[in-house]
Amino acid sequence: MNSTIWTALALVLVLEGLGPMLAPGLWRRMIQSMTQLPDRLLQRFGGGLVVAGVVVYYMLRAHGSN
């Protein structure tokens, strides 16, 4: 697999680990509150994150090729 993908995965893991490492109580409450949200809202939130990620990826690729 491309080293860029491995780097991106590593950064995701670092960022995902910061919440429970630095503020476990707050992180736990956030996760618990998310379990109460309707599925449709979670789907929209997830879709928004995917779109944001694709846009950032596209911008980085476009900027890197110039």
Image (cartoon, rainbow, N blue to C red):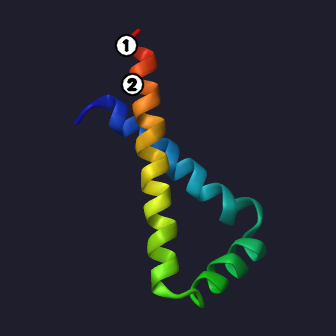
Q: Are the residues tagged 1 and 2 within 8 Å (C-beta)? A: yes
Give the residue displayed 60% in from the left and 91% down from the top.
36
Q: Which residue is mark 2?
A: 61
Would you identify the image quadrant in which residue 33 lies? bottom right
Q: CA distance from mark 1 to mark 2?
A: 6 Å
- Nearest the camera: 30 or 1? 30
The quadrant the N terminus occupies is top left
Measured along the vertical axis of the image, is residue 2 above or below residue 20?
above
Give the residue displayed 43% in from the left and 51% down from the top.
51
The quadrant the C terminus occupies is top left
- Nearest the camera: 35 or 2? 35
Asked which secondary structure carries label 1, the reply is loop
Give the residue displayed 51% in from the left and 42% down from the top.
11
Measured along the vertical axis of the image, is residue 36 above or below residue 61?
below
Q: How many marks?
A: 2
> x and y percent of residue 59 in the render?
46, 29
Q: In the displayed structure, does residue 51 sit left or right of residue 17?
A: left
Q: In the displayed structure, does residue 27 sit left or right of residue 34?
A: right
> x and y percent of residue 55 in the render?
45, 40
- Nearest the camera: 1 or 41? 41
The amino acid type of the residue labelled 1 equals: Ser
Asked which secondary structure carries label 2, the reply is helix
The amino acid type of the residue labelled 2 equals: Arg
Which label is found at residue 16?
A: none
Which label is found at residue 65?
A: 1
Residue at the farthest left position? 1
> x and y percent of residue 31 in the render?
62, 78
Would you identify the image quadrant in which residue 9 lies? top left
